Structures are given as structure tokens and as C-alpha cells.
């Protein structure tokens, strides 16, 4: 069944279900990623929410696995865990020498972690909001493909506490505690959480006789304070400390989970960050929101390039031995200030809500590469400065129809220097925005259409061996249209969100590479970003929830048809992928399952999630296999105590989370070009015990 056929079928199903609709709106989910908090049923565009009830028993799950179950959201590993997220096939897949500007924004409690997402855990989270499509008005340069907004549990007046402990196979051990409540009556509220997660990982190293060279060792510490200054003024402070010291030993010649590397790598990140937000009610007509955030991250990504040990191959096979280490010191400061109208501040005869704001950002990255084939460490400095102004109008044309107009202008300045005497600066004006109509037919039926524009700044490729035409690339622009419907039926027992989308990409940024064989048989692999002229995508996202007493049924489907319309690469030897789908663009994704509560205190959950095959890269034809994964859990609650027995990938299905297909690395096969893949997690299981106060 192709996308167009399934789209028509889905639309007919939704249209038929509205015949039985009841005029009741049951919607407890509030989305806070836009300028105003909005109920999920009232949002326009494609928004998926992973709520607290879905997160509660998933603390030991990997963040990327949970995000990857959202329609048309994919992820790429190539390390101990996935660092990179793609939405509708757009997003980074890796970073080596060159600086990278993100396509997908990742925000945790107001802190921008788009470039440093390793170590995000699900413990003590309240909600994850996934906004799909360009977010040019609200998030600017970080929101070309979409934004993931993550919210931790915030302080409350009542004293709350949560503690949990997890054990599982592969020596998985995790423990966390969260405590919050009133510090000063009617003045100061607080909350803190501490979570430690460790695992040996599922790789074995036969040469070193170890089972933990691809291990997890992650610590997350969060703190939050809410200062109730007075009835009109509130100040929120969020603190974050991440200490991740994971191993990296993931690739093998036979694509198995048994490594021969003699120099296993590291996938580590230390981050200290804070966000400070002030909300001040100026008068009944408007309020002022000011937000400041700062983060500092020290990152190491290193690996054994030859995937073997010295002496594994005879000298006449020309084996080599090399180690590659990438060290990054990142700092970022963001400041956002906006005026937002309230009920008494509407303009144009009281028909229009308004927002105006300004945004400032400074980002710096000091980089060092230590590599066997370099005579000395390679270093570079990359600095960007953003200044933006933005505004949005929400105009009620009548009691059912609303016109939304938004625009953002952003001045982008970047400077790059490195130890090869390269010095490149850019200064350009970027703009994005949206124009939309939403029609509230009834309390339970919202229809919308939105045209939006997003942008991703150009950049520089850091390698003197590249041709001059390969050294830099231009800004990408994305025009996108969404149209859909949010509906609720049968007293809220049946809710659905259906979104169709179509996008045109201009100066599409894609990763390419030059592969050269050295005299010793090893491969010099130089990657770079380039503009592939034009591309487009189309598809749908559909979410259906049915609540029948103690049974909750859910279905999430994402369909995607993406294609390069024109592909031009400055490398004459590059693969011609004109007319092909871009990397990380599976044609379908789904997540289907149910939760069933029985005997009052027991809950059984199960789901099947899957995705179609997709290309690992635009540089070669290697593809990930289509996969279907089965997950289940059984929980029981006794007063303040609960226990959950969980299992993931219960069928022990083999699937891939990263792949290379454009070079050979095995001396035993004469360095013939092969496809090398990193395997996803096998069957995992364990038990989590928790206590709530």
C-alpha cells in the first residue's frame, strides 16, 4: 500500500468517525513549546507528546529509543548511544572534524542541548514534546526539521519524593531519587533529582577478554527552584550536571557483537548548565518573559580505527593500526525576551493576540583531533553569534476561524580558524516564519493548514585536502505545508491526530566524502557537507488513542516519501543519488500496542514498533533492514510501592543503527569494499522497583 492510498484510507476513516462525535473535550495534555501554553487538541501542525504516564515506567529506556517510536522520527548511533535525531529524514548522522549546525533542536528545561545530547535520561521527566516540521518563528536556526522539547518535573508546594532501582541483563544497574516541595512558605519551592545508570553493554571484546568495552556509565543531577516573588512575578531556575563516561567499541569486520579492537574508544560528555526564566505580569494586557541559559560541555569521541589488534593479520596482508580521538570544548549562552499579550491586550478591535521578542546567542567550540596519521594535533575554533527579532499574530476572523502569522529575522555570524591556517567568516541575514488557518468546527473538531519556512545556516568543511569548491556550503531553506485534523469522539474515549505534509528543500545540505587508500592499505576517509540543489518530501503522521475502561489501545503511524530532485556533488567520483531517497528516511514507521489494567493493581503493556528499510548514507547504497520490535512490561502497585518487570526486543530481532558501505577495512579480505553495521540492542530485560511519597 503506497502513501497516497493509505492517506486516502486514513482520511476516510477519520471522516466517518466524526459522524459519531460527542461535543465533549477531554484533553489534559498541555503543549508549552509555542509562545502560549496550548492544549494538545488545539495545536496546529504535527506535534507528538510522550506524557508522564508513558515515561514513568521507562526511566531505564534509552532516550533515543523512546523518541524513535514517534511517527517519522529516526535516530543514528555510531557511538555508545545515539547522538543524532532525524525528523522526516532531516538531521545529522555524525560529526568528525568539521563543525556542524544542528537541524533538530533539543531543549531540556530551557537549556539548548542540540549539539550535546548524549546523556539525556528519562528519569524524573514530566513530558517530551516533538514538533515536526520547520519551527522558523519560535526556534529559528535550530529548528529546520523540528524541535524536541523535554520538560522535567518542576517544584510543587506539596512535598513529593520518588525513588527507584533497576537491575537487568548485561549487568544493567540504575538508581534514582527525586525530592521536591516547599522550602519557604509561599515564597520558594524546590526539587532535585539524581540518577545513575550503568551497563556493560552488549559487545564483547575477545582480544581484551572484556564484556564492558562498549559500556554505559552515566550520571544525571538536576535541580530546580521556583521563586514566587509576588503575585505578578515568578522566577524559575533549572540546574543540570551530566557526567557520561561511556565506552565505544561497536564495529567489527563480520558485523557481530564480538570485537577484536586493542584500543577501545570513549564516548564521554561532561556538561554543566543552567536556565533562568522570569515571568512578569506587567498589567492585565501583557506579560514579559525573559530567559537566560548557559551550558559548558567537554566531549570526547574516540575509537580504534582498524577494529583489530596488532598481530591479528600477517604482515603480507598489509595490516595497519590507528586510533582517532576528537575532543570538543563547547560553550553556549542564550537570551530570549518576549512580550506576550493577555486577554485585555488584544489588538485590532480585540480580535488578535500578539507576541514580539528578541533573541541573542553565542556559541563557541574549541576542537582538538589526535590521530595516528597526523604529525601534530589538529585544532580549530568555531564561533557563532545570532541576533534575532520575531513576532506572531493570532487573529480571530470569526468565532471559529483563526489566522496565524509569524515571522523571524536572524542575523547569523560565524568565524572559523584552524591549525592549517584556514580562516573563514560568514555574515548573513536569515528569515523564517509561518502562515496558517485553523478552523474550530466544534469543541472536539479542529482543522488546520499551515505554511512554514525554516532555515539551517551554511558552514565550513575543515580539511585542506578538499578542493576549494568543497570547503564551504550554503544555507539550506525548507518550505513546508501541513494540513490536518485533531478530533475527539465518544466522550473522549477516542482521540485522533492526523497530519499530512509536503516540503521543498532548497540548497539541501547533505554529507558526502572522499575516500583515499594509503600506501599501507588503510583508508583515508574525508567527509564534508555540500549542497545537493533540490529535494522534496511528503507523507503523513497519524495518532489514534482509544480508552475503554481499563483498556487503552494506541496506534501511531508515520509515512514518508522523500527524494532528491536534483543532486550535484563537487566530487566527480561521488555516487549519483539523483531521484533517490535521502539517508535516514524510512518509508514507514509505526508503534501499535495496548495497556490493560486488571485486578485493580496490575497493568500489562505491550507494543510492536517498526520501521522500513532506509539508506545509511547518501554516499553509498548500503541500507538498514526493515525491523519490527516487540516490547512488554508487567507492573503492580501496592500503596506507595510499585514494581515493573520489563522486556525489550523480546523476539531478539537483529537490526542496525549505523552503517558504512563505501570502504574496506579488513586486511584478511584484501580491503575489499563491504558493508559494516553497528547492531541495535538485542533482547534486554529487567525489573524496576519504585517508591512514591
Image (spheres, rainbow, N blue to C red):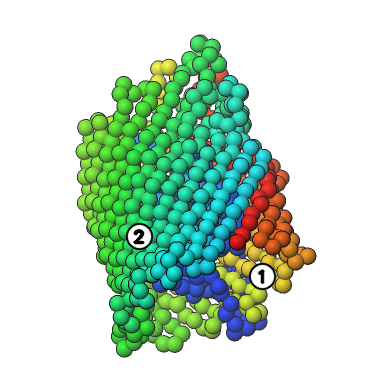
Q: Quarter of the image containing the N terminus?
A: bottom right
Give percent across and percent down for residue 252. Answer: 56, 29
Is disc 1 placed on a helix, strand or loop? strand
Q: Please rate how many residues cluster around mark 2, counting C-alpha atoms within 10 Å: few if below 14, some from 14 to 19, many from 20.
A: many
Q: Nearer the viewer, mark 2 or mark 1?
A: 2
Tell me the number on the disc at residue 546. 1
Horizontal relation, residue 420 to residue 456: left or right: left
Q: Closest to the observer: 576 or 121?
A: 121
Q: Residue at x 23, y 35 (%)?
A: 422
Q: Residue at x 58, y 31 (%)?
A: 212
Give percent across and percent down for residue 194. Answer: 51, 50
Residue at mark 2: 276
Which comes before the other along the chain, label 2 or label 1?
A: 2
Q: Please rate how many residues cluster around mark 1, counting C-alpha atoms within 10 Å: few if below 14, some from 14 to 19, many from 20.
A: some
**Residue 432 found in image quarter:** bottom left
Please indicate, yes or no, whether residue 484 appears anywhere in the rendered image. no
Please indicate, yes or no, whether residue 180 appears anywhere in the rendered image. yes
Amino acid at each position: 500500500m503506497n502513501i497516497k492510498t493509505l492517506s486516502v484510507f486514513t482520511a476516510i476513516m477519520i471522516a466517518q468517525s466524526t459522524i459519531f462525535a460527542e461535543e465533549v473535550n477531554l484533553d489534559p495534555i498541555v503543549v508549552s513549546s509555542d509562545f502560549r501554553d496550548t492544549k494538545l487538541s488545539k495545536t496546529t501542525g504535527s506535534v507528538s507528546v510522550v506524557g508522564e504516564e508513558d515515561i514513568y515506567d521507562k526511566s531505564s529506556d534509552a532516550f533515543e529509543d523512546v523518541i524513535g517510536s514517534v511517527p517519522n522520527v529516526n535516530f543514528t548511533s555510531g557511538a555508545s548511544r545515539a547522538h543524532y535525531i532525524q525528523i522526516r529524514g532531516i538531521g545529522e548522522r555524525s560529526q568528525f572534524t568539521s563543525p556542524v549546525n544542528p537541524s533538530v533542536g533539543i531543549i531540556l528545561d530551557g537549556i539548548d542541548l542540540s549539539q550535546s545530547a548524549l546523556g539525556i535520561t528519562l528519569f524524573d521527566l514530566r513530558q517530551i514534546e516533538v514538533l515536526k516540521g520547520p519551527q522558523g518563528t519560535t526556534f529559528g536556526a535550530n529548528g529546520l526539521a523540528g524541535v524536541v522539547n523535554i520538560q522535567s518535573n518542576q517544584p510543587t508546594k506539596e512535598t513529593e519524593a520518588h525513588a527507584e532501582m533497576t537491575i537487568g541483563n548485561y549487568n544493567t544497574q540504575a538508581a534514582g531519587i527525586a525530592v521536591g516541595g516547599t522550602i519557604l512558605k509561599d515564597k520558594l519551592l524546590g526539587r532535585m533529582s539524581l540518577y545513575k545508570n550503568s551497563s556493560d553493554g552488549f559487545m564483547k571484546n575477545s582480544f581484551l577478554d572484556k564484556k564492558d568495552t562498549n559500556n554505559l556509565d552515566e550520571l544525571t543531577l538536576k535541580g530546580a527552584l521556583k521563586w514566587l516573588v509576588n503575585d505578578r512575578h515568578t522566577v524559575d531556575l533549572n540546574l543540570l550536571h551530566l557526567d557520561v563516561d561511556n565506552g565505544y567499541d561497536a564495529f567489527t569486520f563480520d558485523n557481530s557483537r564480538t570485537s577484536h579492537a586493542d584500543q577501545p574508544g570513549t564516548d564521554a560528555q561532561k556538561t554543566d548548565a543552567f536556565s533562568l526564566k522570569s515571568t512578569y505580569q506587567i498589567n492585565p494586557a501583557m506579560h514579559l518573559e525573559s530567559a537566560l541559559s548557559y551550558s559548558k560541555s567537554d566531549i570526547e569521541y574516540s575509537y580504534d580505527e582498524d577494529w583489530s589488534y596488532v598481530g591479528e593479520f600477517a604482515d603480507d596482508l598489509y595490516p595497519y593500526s590507528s586510533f582517532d580521538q576528537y575532543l570538543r570544548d563547547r560553550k553556549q549562552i542564550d537570551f530570549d525576551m518576549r512580550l506576550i499579550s493577555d486577554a485585555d491586550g488584544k489588538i485590532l478591535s480585540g480580535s488578535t493576540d500578539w507576541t514580539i521578542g528578541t533573541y541573542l546567542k553565542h556559541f563557541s567550540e574549541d576542537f582538538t583531533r589526535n590521530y595516528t596519521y597526523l604529525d601534530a594535533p589538529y585544532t580549530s575554533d568555531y564561533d557563532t553569534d545570532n541576533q534575532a527579532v520575531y513576532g506572531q499574530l493570532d487573529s480571530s476572523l470569526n468565532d471559529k476561524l483563526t489566522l496565524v502569522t509569524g515571522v523571524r529575522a536572524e542575523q547569523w555570524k560565524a568565524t572559523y580558524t584552524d591549525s592549517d591556517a584556514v580562516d573563514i567568516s560568514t555574515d548573513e541575514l536569515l528569515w523564517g516564519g509561518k502562515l496558517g488557518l485553523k478552523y474550530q468546527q466544534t469543541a472536539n473538531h479542529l482543522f488546520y493548514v499551515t505554511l512554514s519556512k525554516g532555515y539551517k545556516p551554511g558552514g565550513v568543511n575543515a580539511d585542506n585536502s578538499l578542493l576549494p569548491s568543497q570547503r564551504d556550503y550554503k544555507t539550506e531553506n525548507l518550505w513546508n505545508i501541513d494540513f490536518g485534523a485533531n478530533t475527539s469522539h465518544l466522550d473522549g474515549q477516542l482521540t485522533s491526530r492526523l497530519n499530512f505534509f509536503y516540503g521543498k528543500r532548497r540548497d539541501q545540505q547533505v554529507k558526502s566524502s572522499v575516500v583515499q587508500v594509503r600506501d599501507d592499505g588503510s583508508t583515508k576517509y574525508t567527509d564534508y557537507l555540500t549542497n545537493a540543489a533540490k529535494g522534496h518530501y511528503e507523507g503523513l503522521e497519524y495518532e489514534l488513542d482509544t480508552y475503554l475502561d481499563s483498556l487503552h489501545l494506541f496506534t501511531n503511524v508515520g509515512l514518508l516519501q522523500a527524494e532528491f530532485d536534483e543532486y550535484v556533488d563537487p566530487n566527480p567520483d561521488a555516487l549519483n543519488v539523483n531521484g533517490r531517497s535521502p539517508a535516514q528516511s524510512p518509508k514507514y514507521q509505526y508503534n501499535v500496542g495496548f495497556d490493560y489494567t486488571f485486578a485493580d493493581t496490575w497493568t500489562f503493556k505491550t507494543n510492536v514498533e517498526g520501521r522500513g528499510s532506509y539508506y545509511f548514507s547518501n554516499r553509498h547504497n548500503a541500507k538498514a533492514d526493515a525491523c519490527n520490535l516487540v516490547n512488554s512490561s508487567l507492573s503492580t502497585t501496592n500503596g506507595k510501592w510499585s514494581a515493573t518487570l520489563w522486556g525489550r526486543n523480546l523476539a531478539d530481532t537483529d537490526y542496525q543503527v549505523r552503517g558504512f558501505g563505501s570502504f574496506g577495512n579488513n586486511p584478511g579480505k584484501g580491503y575489499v569494499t563491504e558493508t559494516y553495521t553497528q547492531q541495535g540492542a538485542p533482547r534486554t530485560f529487567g525489573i524496576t522497583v519504585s517508591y512514591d511519597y
